[in-house]
Image (cartoon, rainbow, N blue to C red):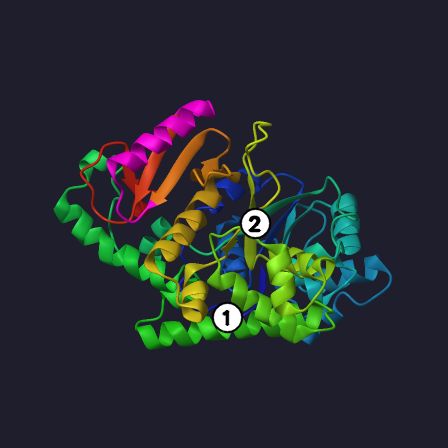
Amino acid sequence: MVRLYVYNVTMKPRLIFEEIKKYLNTPEAIVLTGMRRTGKTTLLQFIYEKIDSENKIFLDFENPITRSYFEPENYEHIKGQLEILGIDFKKKSYIFLDEIQFVKKIPSIVKYLADHYQVKFFLTGSASFYMKNLFTESLAGRKFIFELFPLSFREFLTFKEVPLKIPKSKNDVSHAIFNTVSPLYEEYMFFGGFPGVVLKSNSDEKRKTLEDIFSSFFQLEVLQLGDFRKNEVIRNLMLLLMQRTGSQLDIQKLSSELGVSRQTLNDYIAFLESTYFIKTIRPFSMGRDSEIRKIPKVYICDTGLANCFAKLNAGALFENSVFQNLRLRGELNYYRKKTGVEIDFILNKEEAYEVKTNPYPSDLKKLTSLSQALNIGEHKIISKNFSELGNIMYGFML
């Protein structure tokens, strides 16, 4: 067993591990991707510790010496170097490779070793690495990709070591329970779910960490890998999108504001989505002429980033926080008619959710009517504040 890294953090489980666990003993490579600083390396270390085998190795490609093991053109020579490091290729082995974007030929090396020996690979890397198709073709049908996002609220409580059991029904949420959980959800909403931010002890440290995450993303993803001619334009676009989270993307208006063509703007937006900085959700359509079919809405990867740089109002921040938790459960759409009547989120085309800071009976009536018209049986209002209404839930219950 070899670990070529210094392990000095307390590892906490992520919910996605329960899904990954199903594939620990399959032959396919496990690939972790996602926004920078969401904890991919820590999760990889957590999985490493869970593998009940001495025939395993963890290699960090941020270390240039580690990369040199994979430089030989003859892949059998690479195998030989791994044997010196302790791997026995005559039996089942587990190889963990962190930050694989630093070694461009890794996909073909992984394919060769997995095809010829009993090697199970676990890999992490930059989102841009996958976006540039450096990985897809070589390992077609030989990998499972898992996306890691900022912490859900339930994970946030785990990281904060708060032993709260979230009620499953709104009827179980008394004023006392609500007043206990609400301050925690407010912290989660204002500072977001990046693990490094959650673990900071005060507001100033949290803000500085958020600023560092933004700077790191801009330097390492946008400047180094984005290959854009006008870096200041994409920076300004990022700031504008954070201000407009939860809004429809008006490409024409943004194009005019930033002074770039619509095609260039679309390329920038595609890049930001591929690197997990933003997420666009498409309209739910039943083929009616009255629906707005093509205009997506945009959300930011993390409320902490949005709040740090855009100073959103409480309603927009809450809606983005709801988005962050709902996206972990499947495909999201929204529904809006030209009259302005809307449903904020439709999950897996089966569940409708409307987000309100303070819901009124009329809100519930509209949601029920729209859901019935769309043949969606499950529908609820997600409320930020305490409410006596029925058929609602709170953001912290997602």
Task: Tell me the residue that label 2 is attached to.
Answer: 280
Q: Is residue 361 inside the magenta stretch?
A: yes
Count every numbered label the image shows and give the total. 2
> Which residue does the image show at 67% across and 40% down from the upper left?
27
Please indicate whether residue 367 sits to the left or right of residue 167 in the image: right
**Residue 152 appears in the rendering:** no
Please tell me whether mark 1 or mark 2 is closer to you in this view.
Answer: 2
**Residue 319 appears in the rendering:** yes
- Locate residue 13, reporting x and y percent: 42, 52
* First reached walking from the N terminus: tag 1 or tag 2: 1
> Which residue does the image show at 50% across and 33% down from the upper left?
348
- Locate residue 81, reporting x and y percent: 75, 64
Marks 1 and 2, Cα distance to the nearest angstrom?
Answer: 21 Å
Query: Which region is colored magenta?
Result: 356-377
- Residue 213's mark? 1
Residue kind at label 2, given as amino acid type: Thr
Please indicate whether residue 335 sits to the left or right of residue 79 in the image: left
Query: SS for tag 1?
Result: helix
